[in-house]
Each structure stands twice: as structure tokens, then as C-alpha cells.
């Protein structure tokens, strides 16, 4: 299929076009820098139109109507001239229900499209998107998420006029997935008679909650606490936040505990899935020599040569596992067994360690006992 996308260089356009390419569609990208002749050529041979072009923050209110109503009229006229009955999905706005200039111009654009549907016998799908967020959205424009992610990532202050004000947010990948379903004839209709469609996934959040969550993302580099990826909204918002990091701040340092035995460095922590650390032992060094009631661990040696010893605290029998970075093998550390890890090689023994809970200094559940 040949998909014509108007407003292709905008936020939604860039995300949609990149995914359509991934899926193997031929994409005709049209933007305000292109000519009317180009649009005419595209409307002659396209199989589907995703109409994203529009005006939402002009200096002159009249531009609302020329950009939203006028361009939609031009698009429909060209399709009609070429006798092209390609379906059209239009990006409208929830403000189409309001009486401001922007809302009226969007509503008039919808009306032109519905009229074109009747005259041209073409399928029409109207999406009144709410507050969209995701990668490639311009900060300080019309998205509070983009603005706050940009500012918080740079340690800048943000302004909150009403912490209790509620937003309905739609994530760009969910928007793109819905538009792809629409292209394939499976739109999510909200009102079939009015041809209104919607993105089936959205999230309601207050401004205060939104700010707190984004600020926690920045703090996670210090606390090492990974956000709750089991919550879909948090996962999507965190991905969005990372896309606004300054390009010279993709990396961050960790705090290593170093002594003559080697080092121990915490990498990341989670509230419900424990934490991951990196342990380095010098040649001949033994670490551990302790046991736990409930705390359990997994060791993965990624470099060096060593052995892990276990002993049931009520037994004298020692169990040994040889470990090497040449064979990636996870070793479980059961509760009730005192254990250690010994570097038996000539180079550093490097081990990734996972433990099922974050270290609690007041309740470490760690008891010294030599194997």
C-alpha cells in the first residue's frame, strides 16, 4: 500500500512514518515545505491518507482556518479530481468540542472530510487525540510532558499552576498502533455514525503526580531505583524521559566500594525485584562467608576463574561449584547455606550478583559463618 502522510515531519508524523517503513509500507511524506504539485501527485496514487497536517499555535487566528479547514478542503478536492476513493484518517483534537478558534477550525475540518466521504464514497476516520506524549515531541510547544522531561533532565525548575488538574494522556506508540490498525481496516470506533475513532489506551494523571514521577526518574540515577516497569504508564513515561536527556549526559557514574580485596558496586535496585551489583575479587581473595534466612542470590561469573563453596549450617559437608567466565552459568545461593566465592585464578574474578531484596542496613539478614 502507498500511504500518504500529511504533516510527516511533525511529532506524530515522524513516529508514524518510521513505523510504516518498518512494516514495509510505501510512504508518501508531505509537509508544508512541499509544493501543491507534489500533493497532487501523491493524491493520485495513494491507497490511504493519514492527514496529520494542521495549525495549532499560529500568531494570526485566521491561520487556524487556512491551516486546518482550508488545507483539508484542498486535500479532499485533489482526491476527488483524481477519482481516488482512498480512505482518510484525520488527526483532529478533543478541542473540536470547544468554541475557541482552534476547536472550531478542527471541527470544520472534520465536516469537510465527512462531506467528502459522502460525495466521493470514501471511508473517513476521525481521531480526536488528547494530550499526546513520547519521543520526538517538541518541548515548550504544546506538550507538558515534553517540556517537563526536557527541563527536569537538565535540572531546571518547572511551573505547576494546579497540582490537582487532571490530564488524559495518550502515548505515541499507542497512537501509531491504532493508526496502523485503521490503515488495515480495523479502527477502534467510538461512534460509527459520526466516524469518530479513538486510541483504546490512555492514562489519567494529575499534574502533581506527573511532575513527581518524572522527577523520580532523574533521582533514580542517584538512588539506583529503577521505576516500576510493571506499570505500563510509568514504563512509557520513563522511555519518553530518556529521549530528552542531554546528549552529553547519557552516562552516569556509580559509587564503588573499593578495598585491598577488590570492589563491590551496586548497579540498580527495584522495590519488588531486588538489586543487581558487580563484585570484583583479586586473585586469592575469598569473599562471603555468611548465610541468610530469607535473602537469596544469584551469581554469574563473567570473567576470571573461581569456585563457590556452600555448607548447610547444620552440616560439615562442603559443596563446591567451579565457575569461570568462559562458561556463563548462574549459580543460585539458597537460604540456610553459608557460602563464599574464591578467586582461584591469576586475574580478577568479576561476578554479577542479583539479590532478591534491596540491602537494608537495619535488617541485613546476613550472618557471618565460615564455610
Image (tube, rainbow, N blue to C red):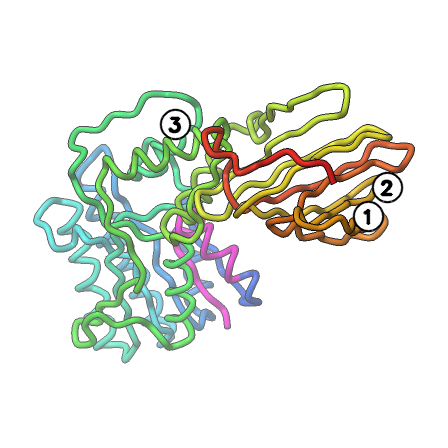
Of callouts 3 and 2, the N-terminal one: 3
* Residue 191, x across and y down, in percent: 18, 72
User: What residue is drawn where x is 38% and y is 47%?
Assistant: 234
Residue 189 on image: x %, y %: 25, 72
Q: Nearer the viewer, residue 39 or 206?
A: 206
Q: Earlier in the sequence, mark 3 or mark 1?
A: 3
Point out which mark residue 15 bears: none
- Dot 2 alpha-carbon crowd within 10 angstroms: few under 14, some 14 to 19, many 20 or more: many
At mark 1, the secondary structure is strand
Specify whether 128 is left or right of 352. Answer: left
Quarter holding residue 106:
bottom left
Q: Left or right of 11: which side holds 116?
A: left
Q: Is residue 136 visible?
A: no
The answer to whether residue 133 is visible is yes
Q: Which residue is mark 3?
A: 152
Question: What is the distance, in whole Å, between disc 1 and disc 2 at their CAs?
Answer: 6 Å
- Residue 6 included in the magenta stretch of the image: yes
In the depicted view, which residue is nearer to us: 32 or 306?
306
Give the image location of residue 93, x and y in percent: 23, 53
Tell me if residue 153 comes above or below residue 340 in the rendering: above
Q: Residue sitting at 27 percent across and 55 percent down?
A: 129
Of tags 3 and 1, the one toward the viewer is 1
Give the residue pinned by disc 1: 323
What's the magenta region?
Answer: 1-20
The secondary element bearing badge 2 is classed as strand
Task: Between residue 80 and residue 131, name the one nearer to us.
Answer: 131
Q: Is residue 161 magenta?
A: no
Assess disc 3: are there few (<14), some (14-19) or many (≥20) residues with their C-alpha within 10 Å of its C-alpha.
many
| Residue 168 coordinates in the image, percent (x, y) | 23, 50
Whether residues under marks 1 and 2 lie with C-beta atoms below 8 angstroms apart, the answer is yes
Q: Which residue is mark 2?
A: 305
Residue depicted at 48% across the width and 38% down the height: 242
Amino acid at each position: 500500500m502507498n500511504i500518504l502522510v500529511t504533516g510527516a515531519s511533525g511529532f506524530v508524523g515522524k513516529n508514524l512514518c518510521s513505523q510504516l517503513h518498518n512494516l514495509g509500507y510505501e510512504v508518501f511524506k508531505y509537509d508544508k515545505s512541499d509544493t501543491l504539485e507534489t500533493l497532487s501527485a501523491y493524491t493520485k496514487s495513494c491507497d490511504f491518507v493519514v492527514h496529520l497536517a494542521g495549525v495549532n499555535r499560529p500568531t494570526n487566528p485566521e491561520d487556524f482556518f487556512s491551516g486546518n479547514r482550508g488545507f483539508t478542503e484542498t486535500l479532499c478536492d485533489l482526491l476527488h479530481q483524481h477519482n481516488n476513493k482512498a480512505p482518510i484518517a484525520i488527526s483532529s483534537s478533543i478541542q473540536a468540542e470547544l468554541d475557541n478558534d482552534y476547536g472550531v477550525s478542527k471541527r470544520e475540518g472534520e465536516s469537510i472530510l465527512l462531506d467528502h466521504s459522502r460525495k466521493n464514497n470514501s471511508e473517513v476516520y476521525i481521531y480526536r487525540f488528547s494530550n499526546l506524549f513520547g519521543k520526538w515531541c517538541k518541548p515548550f510547544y504544546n506538550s507538558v510532558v515534553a517540556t517537563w522531561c526536557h527541563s527536569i533532565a537538565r535540572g531546571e525548575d518547572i511551573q505547576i499552576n494546579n497540582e490537582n488538574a487532571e490530564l488524559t494522556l495518550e502515548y505515541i506508540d499507542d497512537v501509531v498502533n491504532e493508526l496502523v490498525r485503521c490503515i488495515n481496516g480495523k479502527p477502534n470506533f467510538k461512534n460509527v455514525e459520526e466516524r469518530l475513532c479513538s486510541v483504546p489506551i490512555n492514562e489519567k494523571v494529575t499534574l502533581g503526580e506527573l511532575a513527581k514521577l518524572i522527577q523520580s526518574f532523574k533521582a533514580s540515577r542517584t538512588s539506583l531505583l529503577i521505576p516500576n516497569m510493571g506499570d505500563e504508564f510509568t514504563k512509557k513515561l520513563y522511555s519518553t524521559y530518556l529521549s530528552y536527556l542531554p546528549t552529553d549526559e547519557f552516562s552516569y557514574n556509580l559509587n564503588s566500594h573499593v578495598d585491598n580485596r577488590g570492589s563491590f558496586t551496586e548497579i540498580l535496585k527495584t522495590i519488588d525485584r531486588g538489586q543487581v551489583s558487580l563484585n570484583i575479587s583479586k586473585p586469592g581473595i575469598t569473599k562471603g562467608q555468611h548465610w541468610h534466612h530469607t535473602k537469596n542470590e544469584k551469581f554469574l561469573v563473567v570473567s576470571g576463574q573461581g569456585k563457590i563453596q556452600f555448607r548447610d549450617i547444620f552440616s560439615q559437608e562442603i559443596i563446591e561449584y567451579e565457575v569461570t567466565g568462559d562458561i556463563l552459568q548462574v549459580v543460585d545461593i539458597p537460604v540456610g547455606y553459608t557460602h563464599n566465592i574464591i578467586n582461584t585464578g591469576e586475574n580478577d574474578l568479576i561476578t554479577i550478583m542479583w539479590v532478591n531484596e534491596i540491602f537494608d542496613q537495619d535488617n541485613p539478614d546476613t550472618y557471618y559463618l565460615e564455610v
